[in-house]
Amino acid sequence: MTETTSFLPPSFIIHCGACGEHVHHFDWGDTSNTQQYQYVQVTCPECNRGLYQCTLCQYNTIRLSNIKRHQMQSHKLEPQSYDTRISKPRDDNPAPSSPDMMDVDFSCTTNDSQDYETTNAALAEINTHDQPPDDDAGNHIYELDDNPISDEDIVHDEYLTSLITDAATNNDHEHAADDTASPTPTPMNVEYAASRASLAVTQFETMFPNDHSSQVYFWEAYRHSILRGESFGGIKGLLTRSTRQVFHSNEDILMSLDDAAIMFKIMDHALNCKGEQKENFLDIAVDLFGRIPTHTSLECFMSTLGPEQKESFNTFMNGLDEQQRKDYAKLLPSDDSITVPQNEKELTELLLKGKYAAFTNIASPKAKIYREHAVVSIAELLDHVVAHGVPIAWMQDGMGGSINHDINECEVAKEVLEEMRSKWDEPDKVAVCLVLFWSDGFQRSYIKQRDNNVWILTVTILNPHGNGTSPFHTYCIAIGKSSLDHTPIIEYFLKELETIKQEKNRFCGLTNKFIKTAFVPLLWSTDRPERASILHVQNVPSTYGLRSHVAAKANFDSLPHCDRCFSAMIDSIGVGDYPVFHDNLCTDCCRWDYFSNSAAAKTNPLPDKYPTFESSDSPNAPANRTTSETYLVSREQDFDWLSSGVLYSYHNAVSAEPGVRWRQNVMYPFLRSMAINDKVQELNWKSADERNKGAAEDNKPYIPYIWKSGVIQMHQFINSPMHLICHGVAADIIELVDKFLKTHRLGKKFESFANKYLLEIDRFKLCWCKIRYLPKTNWLAEDILGFSRIMPCMYGLFFVHIHDDIADTQKTTVSTILQMLHAFHVMLSALMNPRCSSDAAKIDCYIKLFLSCMHKSIMLITGSNEWWEKKGNFLSLLNLDVMTTSHKE
């Protein structure tokens, strides 16, 4: 008998071969070993089933024949000539009576270096005790045959070995009080345990604590990648377990990738078809597979040979060297691992909704319902993304390197990284990736629009290959009706952001190692209404929040260019790269600068009933919103400033000092001047009023969670180009020009004229110029962008065509409209041009030139500035120069 050190498994957590659960302590029972084999009879405390436990490693089984095969193959115990490729015929195997098991042939298959010579004596000796043990009900317990690989094939990993050794040492301390301490495992046994099961316990369970399916999936993916050099071990193991109807398998040999692909396609097709289509598909699949002849095992193949052929075959196999046997073994018939469902019930149990079904147990983050929304944990999602081996553009990879990406090089990203590095003990060992968020509401269908709006939130992980449409880097993490309150959902994910920003060990499917990772939010892209709702600031129409991220009153008598400044800007065109001003300030206008020191900026009045008094013990007023202000100063918003405004107003609203308590008609104008939304105003006044009426003093001011969380800053909520430019500015331009045309009864005439050209352009099917016909109804962003490319030409040709029909009094208006359209075209071209979009000064100049042209057009068409007050996208264009500076390389 081979000399081998005994290894009793309490040093490790063991997988029960019957129920698949992780068991910390076994009832060891009879620990006496036979002369030829080293095993003990144990009882699993979870399922109370009898097991045979190998004392040399962690393997256990419910069949005596399996434990003997295992020790002959893996530990080279005598007799060594038993050929494990020849298993019992299907009819001799006891049929499983447990409802959890399927009737499948589980022929045992050896490793490629196994000797093929058959020893009938050994086969007879093993099969003598081949009946499985019974459970409490007297039913046979069915178990998969095991086929561990040989010790020579194990790839030794010092890092993993140290992890297992540490685990063994810790467990020895835990069992120090036991009467009989387990012997220390030899290095060979430690590495073998690491390759088989210990990783699933010491690391994968920590990473996926409540998800057994993901633990087993990524463990099998790791094991087959490291030990066998095979890819897709996780999906092969998933479908193997589904076919064999078990939660956990001790098998090292899984179904082939081709078989797994077929089973996966069957599952995918079944998920996408219903009713009669599914039944027809099953009929076709069953008929096709029924026509394919297969051998279920090598024994079936041998049974088709005559005596002389068998002898020739054995002679041939004995004459091969080890490498030739490995190559030939790939050509031998193997188990038919595909189980084709015969009907819809079997299909559901096998692949879709059964206890062991592939779809039920697939490794993925689990969705749950929270506040009437379907949500997916960001932390769980990132765990799976990294474990699946999705390529990620790490800003730093934890090993002194980084991946080049445009976003990684921007100033905001660098600031965020430095802030996070200052919080870690070993920042160079943490792999850091930036994540981007996007949220919006949209209609599922243009036909049924009532109660049809849906709100979604997505997260995007940077792709090193630059593919912005990769399905492996953008995920939907929340979905619900647009009519619902999304504030609890936003708060839920803000708390998760606090978690993912912390360093965490995650298994990396690309390197097959655990690495320290952290994910940091860079920006949150939204449209204007969505952003105002998330940030709890005023939305349009608004007096003090017309420009995003700025609390100010837009005075269109002083904010736009005056005639002198506009003429100077026009005259400078062609002199340099872009129009500039030579003087610093103008006393008549602010030149679209909200923060100008011009005298014109000091004409913005304070809101009616703005407070002019405060209590003596009042905290400091927020900057530029003191009680001594003489005009409303424009102020860029941030969360600290908004929070200080709420605390300041609340304190004065509950002040007990006579004559200085703020009433509702004073508190509201103050908060409104800071562009705080109505909800925050109402909640704070309600709390203050209840406290003044004798309510408990624990009534506190309401400050939105996003203001005080510190996870993401206000400037990281940016304008979505699709909404700002396409659905915003461009759509409003079309609306304004259409208003002018309809006023002069030219609307239908323009549509007929333009559609002839649009039809010809549409025939080219240009991917960069999507076209729809007029009138503008249900246009997508790409349709508006396509029309914006040809807008100056389209309107210009039309006005030339009807030149004689235009009254002389309207020719000035037409000229101004064309001027505005060309200015918009120049601005749009600069924004979409990578060579110009990084020049903040040029972008700012083009935007202000367009806004002045737009202002003149509005005044000529509508006769007042009221049109501006309903449009918040135009003034938000002024934020692009700052965004360009902070987000450029």
Image (spheres, grey):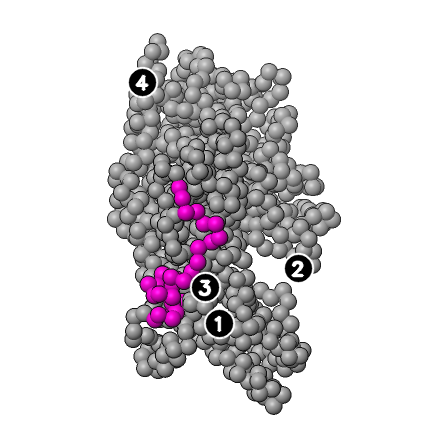
The reply to whether residue 127 is in sight is: no
Mark nearest the camera among 4 and 1 is 1
Quadrant in the picture for residue 160: top left
Reading the image, the residue beneath label 2 is 446
Q: Are marks 1 and 3 in contact (CB under 8 Å)?
A: no
Question: In the rendered structure, does residue 594 fall within the stretch colored magenta?
Answer: yes
Work out whether mark 2 precedes mark 3 in sequence or the reverse, and give the earlier one: 2
Q: Are marks 4 and 1 in contact (CB under 8 Å)?
A: no
Q: Which secondary structure type mostly characterizes the magenta part of the structure?
A: loop
Query: Residue 601 location in percent, x, y?
Result: 38, 63
Query: Residue 628 location in percent, x, y?
Result: 36, 50
The reply to whether residue 618 is in sight is: yes
Mark nearest the camera among 2 and 3 is 3
Residue that lies at the very extreme toward the top in this rendered image: 179
Q: CA distance from mark 4 to mark 1?
A: 79 Å
Reading the image, the residue beneath label 4 is 173
Secondary structure beneath dot 1 equals: helix
Q: CA distance from mark 2 to mark 3?
A: 38 Å
Reading the image, the residue beneath label 3 is 555
Question: In the rendered structure, does residue 554 fall within the stretch colored magenta?
Answer: no
Secondary structure beneath dot 2 equals: loop
Quadrant in the picture for residue 847: bottom left
**Crowding at label 3, few (<14), some or many (≥20) Cα neighbours within 10 Å?**
some
Q: CA distance from mark 4 to mark 3?
A: 76 Å
Reading the image, the residue beneath label 1 is 855
Q: CA distance from mark 1 to mark 3?
A: 12 Å
585 over 94 or under it: above or below: below
Q: CA distance from mark 1 to mark 2?
A: 33 Å
